[in-house]
Image (tube, coloured by chain):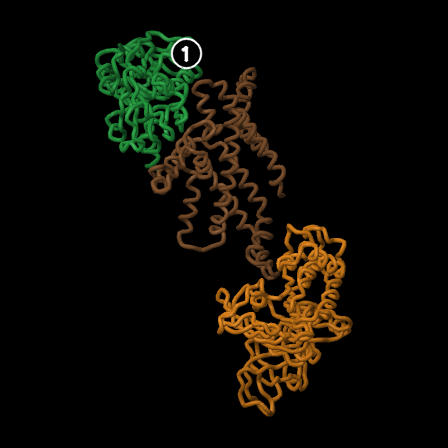
Chain colours: A green, B brown, C orange
């Protein structure tokens, strides 16, 4: 019993020493401290930014990038009320404007574009050939909710194609983000949906069938990124934004299906 | 009551009361009227009430024979059945939704054949919302009814049969009336749980105003675009729940 | 019109074998200590338990016949039961409780309620018709339970420990009500109890049930004259010895019981040895002394007084000799001898005073 206590005490001491030595906040810029930045990014950026995050961490030792992915509208709201983000990457300018007027942003850059695509389950049960088929009565169409960028974009595409009303009658569910739309289609629950081209990643591709939207009706989404005013580690945040706009970040985004910013 | 216990009890009350007070304070009262009177709010509320009530009643129908079997019968695998019944309570609701999809979705175990042969699809309909709510709330009914059945004096049922009552008559005139308090308690619990159900509903039934967008889903959607509106809707949901529970508690649950 | 029971029942390793007959017009009291199997028998008659073997027949209808695989369900039987704990339905009024057996059998509601109300009036609780069981006193509840058992005019009326739940005062009032009800009931009447006084008061004939077997049947007097078991002897208040009979010297024998042996007069008509001899001795035939007595009594036992029961001008004194003895002496003798609990006494009786019962 006594030995256990001694071992326990020794272990605790070691742990305490170990923890204590690494936790030394220094206000000076640079140096050998471990630092962390928090990035709020649209859920369509999940795969791409996760990769960018680990690349950035590899290039900057002792640095941790923490992500929070979600619908851009919701994220903007969270930053405004809780204010814990250093960087915000939005799927539409609207929510970046929203944040800019509420909290304020700096170093705002458009870093990627995305176009929309129609997806269906692999066996395409409803026989969708083109965008006009989305007006067929009785079809089960899943879109992201109004207010979520890809939801608004999708409805814009439908308006551009002149089938807004007919397609609206086919909507069976308004999902909270693009990933949920993909999930519903990949599982075969609904007949078709509209998501970003970048959503059809390497792992998603076998589970859905994609149909191009003609260039004249398609919507190109512009993604802005910025440093949030009042960020804790603003210099690191700026470094991250630079990385995303830089050649390495751009290459990664290309690989994940995003279009260049211009 | 000892002071320490009273203090801790006070914390308990605060834990529940403070969020509610926060809601009330944060509600944008100037806009609240418009938000709550809006079509979408009323639709969501009506849908929620219908779905929750339907869930509670369907749940009761399913729960009663189950509770009877668990309380009165001996059979192999009873422990397994009981564990299964409790499962929806401990499962994260979204997981429940995923599970429901795998069984009753268009490509599901049961839903698949139903769709292929009869063209019947449950997802994206109000029935899916009812099914999702029933799934998460009926365990509460089973538990309440099982407790009630166990505490029932079986001798009263035996006595009734010696008085010429056939089994259904005994059930109708002796067992069920004596179980009424537990049934009511179970219904209230199940109804409240069903009213607040979110994860399984959004995963299995989808989110469409008028058909599957119950009040919790409406709140969530509002939260993304108009947090103030979401708060107003949340307050509505809480108020409706409170009113129903307090009224029913007064009528049915005052047993002793 | 009679009830004939001849069954073997097994419940949780307890085995009951009972055979008896009950004719209409007589109240049969089923009397036995707790654990004797009385509740099991009630359950069989009610139809809630099936016998392992045997047959139960009531008024020409076969309620149970194991060999023929016949079992009439409880709800089809015409049996009215007053249960030991009354088992009034707590959620129904007294009136609805009494109407229940009628309504369960399809009698229209208002006719059932009328008949119930009339019966409650006859039994003296008419004004409590709308009370719930929880609001009734012990005596009132008993009357309601009795009404409920009678209302459907059953062919067998079964009273299970009808007075046990009542306090002394209520018991007196209910006792006469029960007796009158039994007297006027046209069908077969069966009373089940552990209380010999209750049994003796209310029954015309007794069936003694001990450890799952019927040990004796007869009128209270018949049993008093010739009790066959110690339970029966206790019932009628005599000293009871059972054991092995061995011939001793001139004209006497030893009755060897597990608690001790006594000397009895040698019975001329019994075999030399007998394994199951029964001897009965009236308490009045035992004398008590403070000193070892001299005299012709062949049985002298020493013991301490462990109980004194006064009844009028007589007293029954329990002595913890081996075997245990109960003596009946006058109150005067108690005070003359200065007997109290704990006093050392000698009890004596003559060999010829022990009655040996024929087997």
Image quarter where the N terminus of chain A lies is top left
Nearest the eye: A73 or C145 = A73
Q: Which residue is mark 1?
A: A98
Identity of the residue drawn at 60% across and 85% down: C358
Identity of the residue drawn at 70% across and 54% down: C110
Q: Report the side of C198 relative to A121 (left or right).
A: right
**How many numbered circles does the render carry?**
1
Circle 1 residues within 10 Å: few <14, some 14–19, many ≥20? some
C209 is higher (above) or lower (below) than C245: above
> Which chain hosts label 1?
A
Nearest the eye: C336 or C138 = C138
Q: Report the side of B73 relative to A60 (left or right).
A: right
C213 is higher (above) or lower (below) than C294: above
Find residue C86 and report its horizontal and vertical position in percent: 65, 58
Find residue A50 and report its horizontal and vertical position in percent: 28, 21
Residue B22 shows up from this direction? no
Find residue B202 and report its horizontal and vertical position in percent: 41, 30
Image quarter where the C terminus of chain A lies is top left
């Amino acid at each position: 019993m006594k030995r256990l206590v001694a071992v326990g005490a020794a272990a605790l001491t070691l742990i305490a020493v170990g923890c204590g030595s690494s936790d030394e906040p220094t206000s000076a810029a640079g140096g050998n401290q471990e630092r962390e930045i928090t990035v709020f990014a649209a859920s369509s950026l999940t795969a791409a930014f996760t990769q960018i995050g680990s690349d950035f961490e590899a290039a900057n030792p002792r640095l941790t990038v923490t992500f929070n992915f979600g619908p851009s509208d919701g994220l903007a709201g969270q930053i405004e009320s809780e204010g814990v983000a250093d960087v915000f990457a939005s799927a539409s300018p609207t929510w970046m404007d929203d944040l800019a007027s509420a909290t304020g942003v700096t170093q705002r850059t458009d870093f990627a574009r995305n176009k929309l695509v129609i997806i269906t389950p692999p066996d395409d049960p409803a026989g969708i050939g083109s965008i006009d088929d989305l007006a067929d009565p009785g079809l089960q169409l899943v879109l992201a909710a109004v207010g979520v960028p890809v939801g608004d974009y999708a409805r814009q595409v439908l308006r551009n194609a002149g089938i807004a009303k007919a397609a609206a009658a086919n909507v069976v569910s308004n999902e909270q983000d693009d990933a949920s739309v993909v999930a519903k289609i990949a599982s075969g629950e609904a007949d078709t949906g509209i998501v970003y081209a970048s959503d059809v990643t390497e792992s998603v591709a076998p589970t859905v069938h994609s149909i191009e939207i003609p260039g004249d009706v398609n919507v190109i989404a512009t993604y802005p990124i910025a440093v949030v005013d009042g960020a804790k580690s603003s210099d690191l945040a700026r470094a991250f934004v630079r990385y995303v706009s830089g050649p390495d970040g751009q290459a990664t985004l290309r690989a994940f299906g995003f279009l260049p910013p211009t | 009551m000892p002071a320490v216990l009273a203090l801790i009890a006070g914390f308990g009350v605060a834990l529940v009361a403070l969020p509610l007070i926060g809601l009330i304070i944060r509600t944008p009262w100037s806009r609240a009227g418009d938000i709550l009177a809006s079509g979408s709010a009323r639709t969501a509320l009506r849908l929620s009430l219908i779905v929750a009530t339907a869930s509670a009643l369907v749940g009761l129908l399913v729960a009663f024979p189950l509770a009877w079997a668990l309380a009165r019968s001996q059979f192999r695998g009873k422990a397994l059945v009981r564990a299964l019944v409790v499962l929806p309570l401990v499962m994260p609701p979204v997981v429940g939704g995923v599970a429901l999809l795998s069984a009753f979705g268009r490509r599901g175990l049961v839903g698949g054949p139903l769709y292929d042969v009869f063209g019947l699809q449950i997802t994206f309909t109000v029935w899916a919302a009812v099914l999702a709510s029933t799934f998460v709330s009926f365990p509460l009914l089973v538990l309440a009814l099982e407790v009630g059945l166990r505490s029932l004096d079986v001798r009263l049922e035996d006595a009734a049969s010696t008085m010429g009552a056939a089994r259904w008559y005994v059930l109708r005139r002796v067992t069920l009336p004596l179980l009424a308090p537990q049934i009511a308690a179970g219904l209230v619990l199940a109804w409240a749980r069903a009213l607040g159900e979110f994860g399984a509903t959004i995963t299995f039934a989808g989110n469409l105003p008028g058909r599957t967008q119950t009040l919790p889903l409406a709140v969530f959607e509002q939260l993304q675009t108009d947090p103030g509106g979401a708060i107003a809707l949340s307050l509505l949901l809480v108020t409706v729940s409170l009113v129903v529970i307090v009224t029913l508690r007064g009528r049915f649950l005052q047993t002793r | 019109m009679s009830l004939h029971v001849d069954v073997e029942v097994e419940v949780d390793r307890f085995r009951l074998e009972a055979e008896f007959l009950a004719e209409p017009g007589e109240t049969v009291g089923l009397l036995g200590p707790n654990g004797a199997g009385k509740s099991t028998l009630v359950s069989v008659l009610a139809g809630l338990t099936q016998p392992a073997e045997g047959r139960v027949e009531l008024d020409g209808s076969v309620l149970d016949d194991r060999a023929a695989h016949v079992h009439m369900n409880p709800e089809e039987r015409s049996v009215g039961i007053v249960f030991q704990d009354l088992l009034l339905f707590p959620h129904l009024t007294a009136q609805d409780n009494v109407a229940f057996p009628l309504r369960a059998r399809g009698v229209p509601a208002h006719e059932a309620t009328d008949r119930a109300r009339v019966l409650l009036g006859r039994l003296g609780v008419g004004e409590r018709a709308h009370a719930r069981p929880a609001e009734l006193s012990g005596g009132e509840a008993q009357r309601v339970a009795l009404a409920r058992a009678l209302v459907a005019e059953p062919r067998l009326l079964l009273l299970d420990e009808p007075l046990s739940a009542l306090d002394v005062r209520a018991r007196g009032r209910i006792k006469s009500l029960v007796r009158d009800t039994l007297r006027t009931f046209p069908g077969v009447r069966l009373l089940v109890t552990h209380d010999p006084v209750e049994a003796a008061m209310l029954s015309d004939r007794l069936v003694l049930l001990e450890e799952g077997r019927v040990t004796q049947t007869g009128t209270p007097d018949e049993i008093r004259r010739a009790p066959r078991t110690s339970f029966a002897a206790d019932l009628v208040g005599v000293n009871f010895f059972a054991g092995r009979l061995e011939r001793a010297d001139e004209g006497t024998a030893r009755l060897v019981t597990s608690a001790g042996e006594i000397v009895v007069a040698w019975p001329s008509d019994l075999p030399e040895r007998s394994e199951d001899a029964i001897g009965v001795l009236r308490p009045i035939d035992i004398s008590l002394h403070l000193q070892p007595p001299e005299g012709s009594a062949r049985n002298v036992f020493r013991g301490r007084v462990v109980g004194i029961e006064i009844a009028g001008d007589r007293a029954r004194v329990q002595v913890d000799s081996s075997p245990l003895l109960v003596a009946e002496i006058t109150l005067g003798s108690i005070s003359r001898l200065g007997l109290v609990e704990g006093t050392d006494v000698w009890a004596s009786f003559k060999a010829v005073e022990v009655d040996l019962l024929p087997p």
